Amino acid sequence: MGRGRQKAKQTKVARQLKYYSPETDYQALERELTNGTQTYVADRFESPPVEDEDADRPPRTPPTLSR
């Protein structure tokens, strides 16, 4: 029986989030974009090289079929 009230509240919150537009600080955005040091996303999240665990193991030979 409480589903109608719950749905109405969710709809209200969703509508507020959809149409909410905060004031944008363009000066802060410009400072951030013209920082001078170029940092790319790939550089910030670079992971160490992955070692091959099977590198020291000899290659597998396929089983032979015997009739």
Image (cartoon, rainbow, N blue to C red):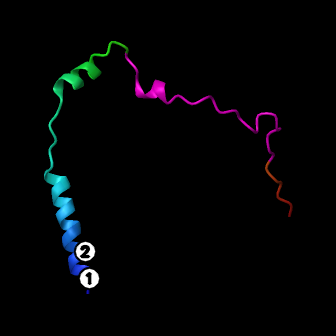
User: Residue 20: where, in percent of width, then height?
Assistant: 15, 49
Majority SS type along the magenta span: loop
Q: Residues within 10 Å of mark 1 (few under 14, many from 20)?
A: few
Q: Residue at x 76, y 34 (%)?
A: 55
Q: Which quadrant of the structure image shows residue 39?
A: top left
* Residue 26 to residue 14: above or below: above
- Secondary structure at badge 2 equals helix
Label 2 sits on what residue type? Gln
User: Residue 32: where, in percent of width, then height?
Assistant: 28, 22
Label 1 sits on what residue type? Gly
Q: Count every numbered label the image shows and give the total.
A: 2
Q: Residues within 10 Å of mark 2 (few under 14, many from 20)?
A: few
* Residue 6 to residue 13: above or below: below
Question: Residue tagged by mark 1?
Answer: 2
Given the current orientation, which residue lies at the most extreme top position?
36
Span of residues in magenta: 38-61
Q: Residue at x 18, y 22 (%)?
A: 27
Position of the N terminus by quadrant: bottom left
Q: Do the numbered discs 1 and 2 sit on residues whose CB atoms are within 8 Å? A: yes
Question: Residue tagged by mark 2?
Answer: 6
* Residue 13 to residue 44: above or below: below
Position of the C terminus by quadrant: bottom right
Looking at the image, residue 43 sits to the left or right of residue 37; the answer is right
| In magenta stretch: residue 51 | yes
Q: Which quadrant of the structure image shows residue 52?
A: top right
Q: Residue at x 22, y 21 (%)?
A: 30
